[in-house]
Amino acid sequence: MTVPIGERGLGPLPGHLTVGEESIELPSVPATAGSDGLAISSLLAKTGKVTVDPGFMNTAACTSDITFIDGAQGVLRYRGYPIEQLAASSSFLEVAYLLIHGDLPTHHQLDEFVERIDRHMYLPEDFREILSIQPRASHPMAMLGVAIHTMACFYPESMDPLNPAAVDLATVLLLAKMPTMISYIHRRAAGYALLYPRRGEGYVHNFARMTFARPGEAADLPDALAEALDTLLILHADHEQNCSTSTVRLVGSAQANLYASIAAGVAALSGPLHGGANEAVLEMLARIRDSGRDVPSFMTKVKDKQDGAKLMGFGHRVYKNYDPRAAIVKRSADKVLAALGVRDELLDIAREVETIALADDYFIERKLYPNVDFYTGIIYRAMGFPSSMFTPLFAFGRLPGWIAQWREMMTDPTTRIGRPRQVYVGHAKRDFIPWEDR
């Protein structure tokens, strides 16, 4: 089997695939950045064969103009804008608008977008009652999935995936009610009553007050903490075709409504291999602390694979260089702890782990650089979030990307209902054996 591919730089030349005596042309799908694609949709019809690609490591399920990642160079861009510029100069809702609508908003567009979201942050009383009947020990991600599914019951006028006005309403409702839902999930687990949002208070500040305020006490985050939270939400806003985003697209390809599709993304994110990495980092750092803070010894155990020692928060499925988000998060961690006037022992251990890893050939050769999860948990913990809330916060940040990807898919004329193929390796035909003969 041979696959001669046209050279880069000569335009979208097709490739050719030879299978036995059959040679077929694979049309090129050119990229504006990154790898071009080869369309293989005719492979089965012409050769009777399918491709096998576990984990879809080499399969592009769609074309997209939302997010670009260059893992080798450590590049992340939303709609062409570098993540470093957006994190330094933008706000989460401005980035949400950019991802969903394709361009940075004008002042008027952003004011209108923010005002509309601000107006819809309130949760109906019946909605709160539905959440309140869930067991208090429920996992926050299970609660969040229930809450998002429940929105379809309360807002049926926003469910039609082919009606632009309905989709716009669902988009605003999800962005508006997500912080209120997450604050309630957090407060219910802590034994506090739900607080109502306040108009004009600001998106992140509103969320912080609803989450942390106690009776008779102020609960405004210091500006440095609010800015750090806003930045973390921006850094998580989209990340191309990851597991949860692919799930949102796959469910949406059946023309499922936006709420059902986003709830499916929440379910995918709840898996520890996807959304639980920052919690695993804190657990690792705590183990190092509790075993005497001997970081060099721990790193040696990691290299020698002793005692099940694993280096959490390093390496990435896509990035083979320093995760561009990690450097931003590291600076945010410093600002947050300085604003609180505290010193976090786990942050000191994290810095030592990073220093050793970046200077050791073992980790360098394996391209094990810090990823965005390495410092994220430390910031969330400093803000007062328990580790069980880390993944809901991840979902909070990723919401605009999920919405943008779903909307792009729904308006793409090439979209087909997702239906992966398989290579069957089970029994060939077998005759049924009657009960008395078994």
Image (cartoon, grey):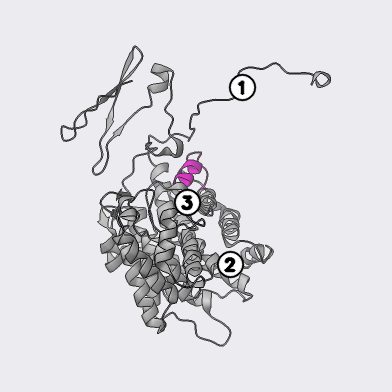
How crowded pointer 3 is (Cα within 10 Å; few <14, some 14-19, many 20+) is rated as some
Q: Is residue 147 a member of the stretch shown in magenta?
A: no
Foreground mark, 1 or 2, reads 1
Foreground mark, 3 or 1, reads 1
Q: Amino acid at mark 3?
A: Ala
Quarter occupied by the C terminus: top right
Quarter occupied by the N terminus: top left
Write down the residue under mark 3. 166
Dot 1: element: loop
How crowded pointer 1 is (Cα within 10 Å; few <14, some 14-19, many 20+) is rated as few
The part of the chain drawn in magenta is: 246-257
Query: How far is mark 3 from mark 1, CA to CA?
Result: 48 Å
Dot 3: element: helix
Write down the residue under mark 2. 185
> Residue 213 at what x, y percent from top left?
53, 80
Q: Which mark is residue 16?
A: none
> Residue 365 at what x, y percent from top left?
30, 50
Q: Amino acid at mark 1?
A: His
Q: Is residue 251 a member of the stretch shown in magenta?
A: yes
Q: Are marks 3 and 2 in contact (CB under 8 Å)?
A: no
The residue under the point 58% across, 84% down is 215
**Quadrant assignment, res 139:** bottom right
Q: Amino acid at mark 2?
A: Ile
Dot 2: element: helix
Q: Height in image: 25 above or below 321?
A: above
Write down the residue under mark 1. 427
